[in-house]
Amino acid sequence: MPAIAPIRLGVNVDHVATVRNARGGRHPDPLKAAEIAIAAGADGITAHLREDRRHIVDDDIARLKDRITKPLNLEMAATPEMVSIACRLRPHAACIVPERRQERTTEGGLDAAGERETLRAAVGELAAAGIWVALFIAAEPAQIEAAAAIGAPVIEIHTGAWCDAVAAGNASAGAVEFERIARGAALAKGAGLEVHAGHGLDFVTGEMIARLDEIVELNIGHFLIGEAVFDGLGVVVRKMRAAMDRGRRKIGAKP
């Protein structure tokens, strides 16, 4: 039997910066949160530098890049400004996401099929700087095929619709969405892409999706930072790591 790929946990520290920015100053510090998460078992740190700098700011990215001991994944829009910042700071990875000023959070995947040339140019520049590039897309065949054609080595599947269905107790919709993710992950792996997933994941859905051996990384932020208010970030990251590991031991089982 072939070995099962381990599954990595990337912890997104954006909303530590959201709390800091609500009052100003430097507390709480996303860098300290990143260090706690790594000590508790995170395999990497994700931070989204938005055009409007609503949470993470440029100095956060520079300090994270310089001081954390695990890979930094920069979430970013495919704009000249963000590509320039990424190429200058050279994080380990960059995940290109759609971005709209009016949204509260990233509300959907990229339209990779409709924005091939813009994305191809951004992916090419980032790759030339030695950055491992992912595209954040829905688990749809047209989007996955476009990502492969663009030349991105990685996709991150948007799991929001599935997580919403699970949270609402809608079993039928949850089953449909999970099957969509499973098919998309298999298609992407077959096309030679590395497959990540994220958006809306919690302990339950994190454990469930870890059963898909095609997915090798989960990026989780809002839920972990929210739970950390009650239990502490180190405790919460260890609980998520344990949930993912339980799921990995059940490869192939239905949710």
Image (cartoon, helix red, strand yellow):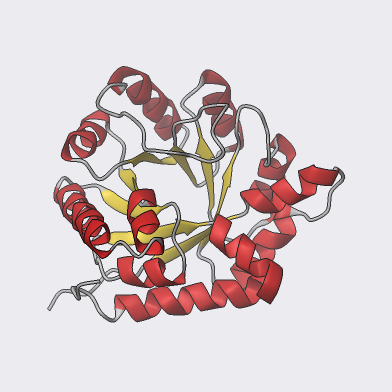
Q: Residue at the location (39% across, 50% down)?
A: 160
In-front residue for pair 237/80: 237
Is the residue 111 above or below the residue 190 in the image?
above
With 223 as the anchor, is 120 left or right in this view?
left
Q: Residue at the location (83% across, 53% down)?
A: 27
> In the figure, residue 181 lies in which quadrant?
bottom left
In-front residue for pair 160/193: 160
The x, y position of residue 177, in whole percent, is 25, 54
The x, y position of residue 152, in whole percent, is 31, 37
Q: Residue at the location (46% across, 26% down)?
A: 78
Q: Residue at the location (33% across, 61% down)?
A: 216
In-front residue for pair 66/180: 180
The x, y position of residue 188, in whole percent, is 20, 48
With 96 as the anchor, is 226 left or right in this view?
right
Q: Quadrant of the C terminus?
A: bottom left
The x, y position of residue 206, in whole percent, is 40, 67
Is the residue 33 above or below the residue 49 in the image?
below
Extreme residue toward the right, this view = 25
